[in-house]
């Protein structure tokens, strides 16, 4: 009787055996090249969801493939374990974040093992472990030494719901990236990293990332936001003082009809007249309730208030009103802008709303703009008008001429500005790495000496009440002695953003047990940069940008020899159900363990790779899962049914007829080996599975034929090859089948199958001949016929000739190996 495929027994057997054999411990065999694939480590929420399963299966397929190709492979896993969600879960469950986090880690580790991933668990990194965050604190001190860490008061993004400060990158659509609630501005003293010192290098080095998706590089470039312009001063009309503005459009400076200050600008209080104080105060309150994203969004209605004061345009001496508006940010440029409503859309909308003057200073050639009838700002090239000595110049040339005039006359200077702001790293919460500084009444702020690290987060305190005040209200943590004078001191009670610990974890994997440094230089130089980094595109301007910054600082410190951490980045698509992202609130979650129990981990893994290209969104399909399971059952039956006939010495078999069943199967086998290897390397994982399905069909057809020595040898080769090719996708099933074929060693340790290009070639092709897209003939040609010869064959076709007679051949389109389309007119 045919043996049933018992996926539960097979998977439990091989997971236990892999663990006993320590099969996936990282090997560094001399003479082999290295490959470091890495999936972004998860936040330990307690359950592996379908997005995790897809992401990690992609990485596991790649890791297994390169190992079988003869590479030394580093494939680790860890947990990004600090952060706000653990605190929220702890409060909700009346437990401690550490208890909750480590329970979640244990559960997720179990689930990841059940999915059969080839992780070297001996290299696991958990960011909330003092052995790890000790080195995050060490990096903080190094940044402090280099002037890259500092403390200052500034308007910050405050989430009233989570009661924490957020970096600009953590504000999504005006809301907190975690809870989604609206974010407001508050003035607070915080710790910052001076990432702006690296803005230009972060921008320029995007050119080094030739294997990154262009859209991700564009996202980072836009976030860094380099602009070239002119900074110049406008004196107040009363002559008391002046203020600076920055513009990227000096060619429009004669079109200034008003200027705008950010609501937070320190000049506002000094210049606002008594009659305007209430209007300005109301505007400032409204702006404080809006996030940076909302205030600068093109879709948001702009609000403003007149201060009652005036400034002087230094280029023409005109007196212009000074307004306050919410669309100007203190942290961008100088916190003040010149407003040219005729040539800037935001200024145009603002001027229309408040009835301010619109003056045209650039006219399109052959047209004349009338401010009274304009419906939008004119931002295209044109000729200068109303611009004094620069009238008649093309505005592109006037840009430089006016900038040069400003510099020569001491009005302003050319400068470069960036949208990127310094990185806010302070968090008002408990569950994070303590910032390693103390405050002494005598010595001021004092860094904790390196030999006193880590500053351990106290975990033996009751977790009740507000997490944002826990450290401040814990005397045993707060009260300490000054490392400099020995007097009484107070510890910093803000903790570091969890992003700090995820900025360098990929380096720690190279030597996770090193206790004298963050990592061993020799190991990092061998394994890094990461060869293929796999994770969600939502991290494009947070985690990826921060990690690049960290590695550049390490590069400058001489800790690493490479300026970029990730050679290639692959953003996987999300898993949807009924067109929406799986979420508990929508009730459309499909738990991976439910599918594993019913169909097996191998079915889930293979389906997740087959359902769509891995970079694309994919909609969950129950029928698709069943179809994938049937494919694996077919492979089980093919291999177990043939195992008794399998010849391990198939290479010595004689192929007598290349055009018969054996010849066709052998050709298909070598074509499949070529395609699957190429597709995995190119991350075309869904088409790799399609190719294996086709091979299994060809094998089933061959099995229906009488079994002679030649067919037995070819089937043996096909069977062995299919098991190896399928292994990265379905490791448990293929281990069992490999053993059934008589092999003692794991299929993971077997070499990837090789293909012969000559064998893989099709001996001949059928060439379709079309005339204006309609089929007129079919010809037979050798598979390696050149495009020129295919063209001649088509033009010489007797069946196509009547459709060419008396007409002019406009174009001949050749699709090699398939068709020739003759376009006539």
Image (cartoon, helix red, strand yellow):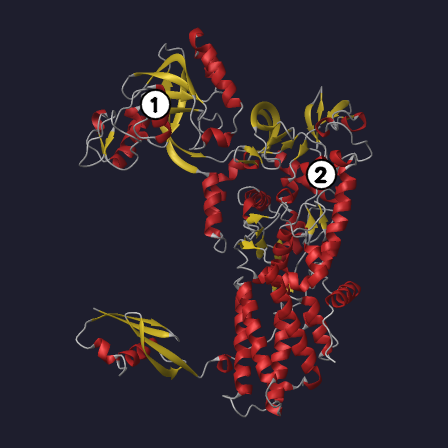
Establish if 109 lies above or below 148.
below
User: Is there any visible trace of residue 235 in the rendered image?
Assistant: yes
Establish if 323 lies above or below 606.
above
- SS assignment at label 2: helix
Q: Earlier in the sequence, mark 1 or mark 2?
A: 2
Picture residue at 50% right of the left edge, 79% below the top: 760
State the residue position of label 2: 86
Q: Which mark is residue 682?
A: none
Q: Quick one: quadrant of the N terminus?
A: bottom right
Picture residue at 53% right of the left edge, 79% below the top: 668
State the residue position of label 1: 351
Establish if 179 lies above or below 120.
above
* Apparent side of residue 338 relative to residue 44 in the rendered image (left or right): left
Categorize mark 2 by other alpha carbons within 10 Å: few (<14), some (14-19), many (20+): many
Quarter of image, res 142: top right
* Apparent side of residue 110 relative to residue 814 in the rendered image (left or right): right
Q: Quick one: quadrant of the C terminus?
A: bottom left
Quarter of image, res 59: bottom right
- Residue 16 lies, in percent from the top left, at 79, 64
Categorize mark 1 by other alpha carbons within 10 Å: few (<14), some (14-19), many (20+): many
- Residue 450 lies, in percent from the top left, at 72, 37
- Residue 639 lies, in percent from the top left, at 67, 78
- SS assignment at label 1: helix
């Amino acid at each position: 009787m045919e043996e049933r495929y018992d996926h539960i027994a097979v998977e439990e057997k091989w997971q236990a055996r892999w663990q006993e054999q320590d099969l996936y411990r990282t090997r560094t065999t001399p003479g082999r090249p290295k490959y470091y694939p890495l999936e972004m480590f998860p936040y330990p929420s307690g359950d592996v969801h379908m997005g995790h399963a897809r992401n990690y299966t992609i990485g596991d397929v790649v890791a297994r493939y390169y190992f079988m190709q003869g590479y030394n492979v580093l494939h680790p896993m860890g947990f990004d374990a600090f952060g706000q969600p653990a605190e929220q879960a702890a409060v909700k469950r009346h437990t401690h974040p550490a208890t909750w986090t480590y329970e979640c880690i244990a559960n997720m580790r179990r689930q990841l093992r059940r999915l059969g991933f080839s992780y070297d668990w001996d290299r696991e990194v958990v960011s909330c472990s003092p052995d790890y965050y000790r080195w995050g604190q060490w990096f903080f001190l190094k940044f402090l030494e280099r002037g890259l860490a500092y403390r200052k008061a500034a308007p910050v993004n405050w989430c009233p719901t989570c009661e924490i400060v957020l970096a600009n990158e953590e504000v999504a659509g005006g809301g907190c990236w975690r809870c989604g609630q609206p974010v407001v501005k508050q003035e607070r003293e915080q710790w910052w990293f001076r990432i702006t010192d690296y803005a230009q290098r972060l921008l320029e080095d995007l050119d080094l990332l030739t294997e990154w998706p262009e859209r991700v590089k564009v996202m980072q470039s836009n976030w860094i936001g380099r602009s070239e312009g002119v900074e110049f001063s406008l004196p107040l009309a009363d002559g008391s003082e002046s203020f600076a503005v920055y513009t990227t459009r000096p060619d429009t400076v004669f079109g200034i009809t008003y200027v705008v200050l950010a609501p937070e600008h320190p000049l506002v209080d000094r210049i606002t007249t008594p009659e305007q104080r209430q209007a300005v105060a109301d505007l400032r309150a409204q702006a404080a309730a809006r996030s940076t994203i909302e205030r600068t969004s093109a879709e948001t209605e702009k609000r403003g208030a007149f201060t009652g004061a005036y400034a002087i345009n230094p280029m023409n001496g005109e007196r212009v009103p000074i307004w306050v508006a919410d669309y100007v940010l203190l942290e961008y440029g100088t916190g003040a802008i010149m407003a040219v409503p005729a040539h800037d859309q935001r200024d145009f909308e603002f001027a229309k709303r408040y009835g301010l003057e619109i003056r045209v200073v650039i006219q399109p050639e052959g047209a004349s703009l009338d401010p009274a009838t304009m419906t939008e700002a004119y931002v295209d090239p044109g000729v200068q008008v109303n611009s004094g000595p620069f009238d008649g110049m093309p505005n592109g040339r006037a840009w430089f001429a006016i900038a040069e005039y400003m510099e020569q006359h001491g009005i302003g200077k050319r400068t470069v500005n960036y949208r990127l702001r310094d990185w806010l790293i302070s968090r008002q919460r408990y569950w994070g790495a303590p910032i390693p500084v103390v405050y002494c009444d005598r010595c001021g702020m004092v860094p904790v000496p390196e030999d006193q690290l880590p500053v351990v987060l106290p975990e033996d305190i009751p977790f009740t009440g507000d997490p944002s005040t826990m450290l401040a209200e814990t005397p045993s943590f707060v009260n300490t002695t000054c490392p400099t004078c020995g007097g009484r001191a107070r510890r910093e009670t803000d903790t570091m953003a969890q992003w700090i610990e995820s900025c360098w974890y990929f380096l720690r994997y190279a030597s996770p047990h090193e206790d004298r440094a963050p990592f061993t230089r020799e190991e990092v130089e061998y394994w890094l940069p990461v060869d293929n980094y796999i994770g969600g595109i939502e991290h494009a301007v947070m985690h990826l940008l921060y990690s690049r910054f960290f590695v550049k600082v390490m590069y400058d410190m001489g800790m690493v020899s490479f300026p970029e951490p990730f050679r290639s980045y692959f953003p996987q698509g999300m898993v949807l159900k009924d067109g929406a992202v799986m979420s508990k609130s929508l009730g459309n979650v499909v738990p991976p363990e439910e599918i594993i129990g019913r169909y097996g981990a191998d079915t889930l893994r293979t389906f997740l790779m087959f359902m769509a290209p891995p970079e694309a969104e994919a909609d969950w399909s129950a029928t698709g899962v069943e179809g994938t399971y049937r494919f694996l059952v077919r492979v089980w039956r093919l291999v177990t049914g043939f195992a008794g006939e399998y010849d391990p010495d198939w290479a010595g078999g004689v192929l007598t007829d290349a055009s018969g069943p054996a010849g066709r199967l052998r050709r298909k086998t070598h074509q499949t080996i070529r395609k699957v290897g190429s597709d995995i390397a190119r991350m075309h994982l869904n088409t790799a599975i399609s190719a294996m399905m086709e091979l299994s069909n060809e094998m089933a057809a061959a099995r229906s034929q009488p079994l002679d020595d030649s067919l037995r040898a070819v089937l043996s080769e096909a069977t062995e090859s299919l098991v190896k090719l399928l292994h990265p996708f379905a490791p448990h099933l293929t281990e069992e089948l490999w053993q059934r074929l008589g092999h003692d060693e794991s299929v993971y340790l077997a070499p990837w199958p090789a293909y012969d290009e000559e064998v893989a070639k099709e001996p001949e092709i059928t060439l379709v001949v079309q005339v204006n897209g309609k089929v007129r003939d079919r010809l037979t040609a050798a598979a390696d016929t050149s495009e020129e010869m295919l063209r001649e064959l088509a033009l010489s076709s007797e069946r196509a000739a009547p459709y060419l007679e008396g007409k002019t051949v406009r174009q001949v389109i050749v699709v090699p190996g398939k068709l020739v389309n003759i376009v006539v007119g």
